Amino acid sequence: MAEPLPVLEMTGIFKEFPGVRALSGVDFRLFPGEIHALLGENGAGKSTLIKVLTGVHSLDAGTITLDGRSVRFASPLQAQQAGISTVYQEVNLCPNLSVAENVFIGREPTRAGRIQWKQLRQEAAKLVDRLGLDLDVSAPLGSYPLAVQQLVAIVRAVGTGDGRGAGTKVLILDEPTSSLDRDEVLELFALMRRLKNEGVAILFVSHFLDQIYEVCDRMTVLRNGTLVSEHMVRDLDQMGLVKLMIGKDLDELEELHDHQLRSDVGDSLLTAEGLGKTGRIAPFDLEIRSGEVIGLAGLLGSGRTELARLLFGADQPDSGKLAVGGRQVSLHAPNDAIAAGVAFCSENRKTEGLVPDLTVRENIILALQAARGWTRPIPVSQRDELVAKYIRALDIRPADPEARVGALSGGNQQKVLLARWLITQPKLLILDEPTRGIDVGAKAEIQKLVVSLSEEGMSVLYIAAELEEVLRLSHTIGVLRDRRLVARLANGPEITPSRILETIASGEHQ
């Protein structure tokens, strides 16, 4: 039997931003009545492809056809009017309005300029019932939990004024399950399958591999803005998928012996028992000893950053307990973590770390001044001495404390962020992707610094997408998958990139 024609086809898609080619000749096709996963690591081009399709970004080159007709949308509204609707991770509805009002907001049935409220509620109830949901459409949306609000957003996306949802050809779901528990995910999947059976083509973006294999029919993998391959889900196992996303075959990954990690780490510094946050990361146990480097490995979205944020008080757990130095602590905010000797360098150094319009000196001194309190300014002589010391120690260039941080290279910006936290003399330093986006020389310097800090007795929690980095630096590797800590591996000759990838792919301790 011949394969049906695609409802959507994108061919030779190119998109550039200043200094960056985000998409390079990408092809993508979507068939009616299928759930199609779009996969790739951070920076692969998934979001850009969706935004080019839906008119958020203009298209530089390539063609898009919908139902065999060439299209190019100038806005998401135009895309929606043509039958392409998008539901993002964050629900963008009005909780103070009723379910019915949210379903038809902006397209309410009217007569003589007046909204027909009875008709609106009837049509909303008909559509909700058609999609198998049990909701009171007259109730405020905010009275329902987030998972139900997510379902209402999907109802709105596929609904039309006649209550049949007939105009929707393509539904894009961008990370819809990231804040849902298992039962809520199952309810969402049931709705997706009902829409699939009605012939709607669903593009599903998720970092949860188990969910991809549970609900999807086909998958497309992108890497660095290019198409890697398209597969039927049944034809590619999870190990093969991980290889495609990372871009390396297991046979090509070699063990690294750049330095010999010392084994005489100290006593327990931090212990987490059953620490977790619903919708963010499942409860986990973790011990970090003085002078120990613990690396976290896992695909993007596996929960590495979520784990780190709990240890730094940036997010508050709803289960478990945490102890630092043998004393139980409650980290209600990052200031509590800083006081307990925990420091955190975010992966988003430009948005969550540095203040680009401030000077190198001002950026370096921020955390220490915050810890002292703004009513107790650091004496000028002490401040200048400390800043000069860390500029020299980290070889920050230019070595000018009055230089604007935004004008520095990525590697030197990362060094400034490291200096900010090292100046507070933490017991535990959390580094989230500290070498992303910087040159090879700066990478080597930062990795050498991690080794040096460990030898001096500082504990380091090191998060990196590159498995080679994790293996090179860590005494212990924590492996995460689908926001669960699934394994804790003592580094040694038998711990290879292959072993870590197998653990990521299977979700089990090998």
Image: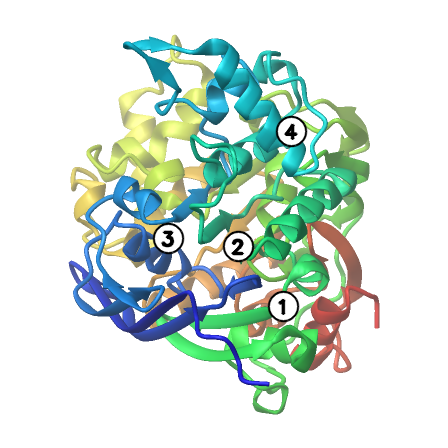
The residue that label 4 is drawn on is 148
The residues bearing labels 4 and 1 have C-alpha atoms spaced at a distance of: 25 Å
Q: Nearer the viewer, mark 4 or mark 3?
A: 4
Q: Nearer the viewer, mark 3 or mark 1?
A: 1
Q: Secondary structure at mark 4?
A: helix
Residue 503: x and y, percent?
A: 75, 70
Figure disc tally: 4
The residue that label 1 is drawn on is 217
Q: Nearer the viewer, mark 2 or mark 3?
A: 2
The residues bearing labels 4 and 2 have C-alpha atoms spaced at a distance of: 21 Å
Residue 273: x and y, percent?
A: 84, 38
User: Visible in this render: residue 356?
Assistant: yes
Quadrant location of the N terminus? bottom right
Name the N-terminal-most of marks 4 and 1: 4
Name the N-terminal-most of marks 3 and 1: 1
Name the N-terminal-most of marks 1 and 2: 2
